[in-house]
Image: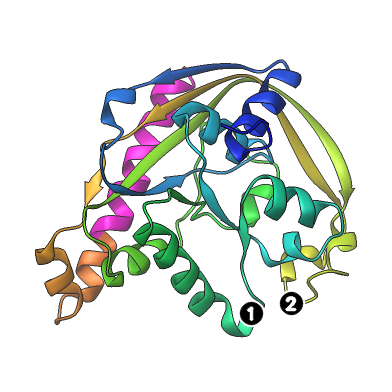
Amino acid sequence: MSLNSPLEISRALVAALSTQMFRYYENRIPQDASILVVSNHRSFMDALILMAALSSPIRFACHHYMGQVPVMREIVTGQLGCFPLDGTQNRQQSFFLQSQLLLQSRQMVGVFPEGTEPMVKFTQPNMVGKFRRGFAHLALRSNVPDLAILPIAIASLEEINTSGFPLRFLSVFDPSEPLFNQPGWHPLVFYRRVAVLIGRPYWITPQHKKKYHGKQARTVVAELTEHCHGEISNLLRQGCY
């Protein structure tokens, strides 16, 4: 494996930040399958931690502005292999298209369903916000055989919190994001000790897809979303105490 690969870069950065990482329930990681990783999100370190914990490159969907900021763009897309979402108008369509192509080629894809809010507002380590349901729609409508949704909890055991830069600075790169149009500073969370707890995978079956394309779409999307949110919430409570 190249020293410039996303996995090697992630391991090197986690080591450089002197972060102690503990991994639990690794036997739940599906083998010989396409995997969509779903996780809680509080720190810029989350993508690095997940790649290091799973010992695999993960192609993360990330916020539109990350593809606009010089230097950050090169690191996020070029070095770590993330794919920034398009602007507001085409965001969902581009997410579905890029993610499905990656999953079909058996690359691991990662999403943070809480969105941007927990990144721009300081949140407690044992709390997880409401999930957006885009990842569930992706999984249920994608033409990907042997697809597993893998919920993972990142539980901070010890961390350092500081301020990074003014939120309004980011509005220069993405004026459409209302969270950037407010006073205050972007928080930065550095993990000193962190537990990565892997949840029970949710396998997408032909029956799920039949329900989704029939009259039970709302029900099956809610079931998948609630499974992932519930798994991560329970694992966070377990990991943070």
Q: Position of residue 192 (x, y in %)?
A: 68, 18
Tell whether position 234 is magenta: yes
CB under 8 Å between discs 1 and 2: yes
Viewer-nearest residue: 39 or 48? 48
Q: Position of residue 196 (x, y in %)?
A: 47, 26
Tell whether position 184 is magenta: no
Find the magenta span and give its range.
Answer: 223-240
In the rendered structure, the answer to whether residue 201 lies left or right of residue 187 reads left
- Residue at the bottom extreme? 89
Q: Residue at x 46, y 62 (%)?
A: 132
Q: Residue at x 29, y 72 (%)?
A: 141
Mark 2: which amino acid?
A: Ser
- The prevailing secondary structure element of the residues shown in magenta is helix
Above/below status of 227 relative to 28: below
Viewer-nearest residue: 8 or 118? 8
In the rendered structure, the answer to whether residue 241 lies left or right of residue 80 reads left
Q: In the image, which disc is placed on residue 176? A: 2
Does any portion of residue 103 appear in the rendered image? yes
Packing grade of label 1 (10 A; few <14, some 14-19, many >=20) is few
Q: Residue at x 34, y 63 (%)?
A: 136
Count of numbered marks: 2
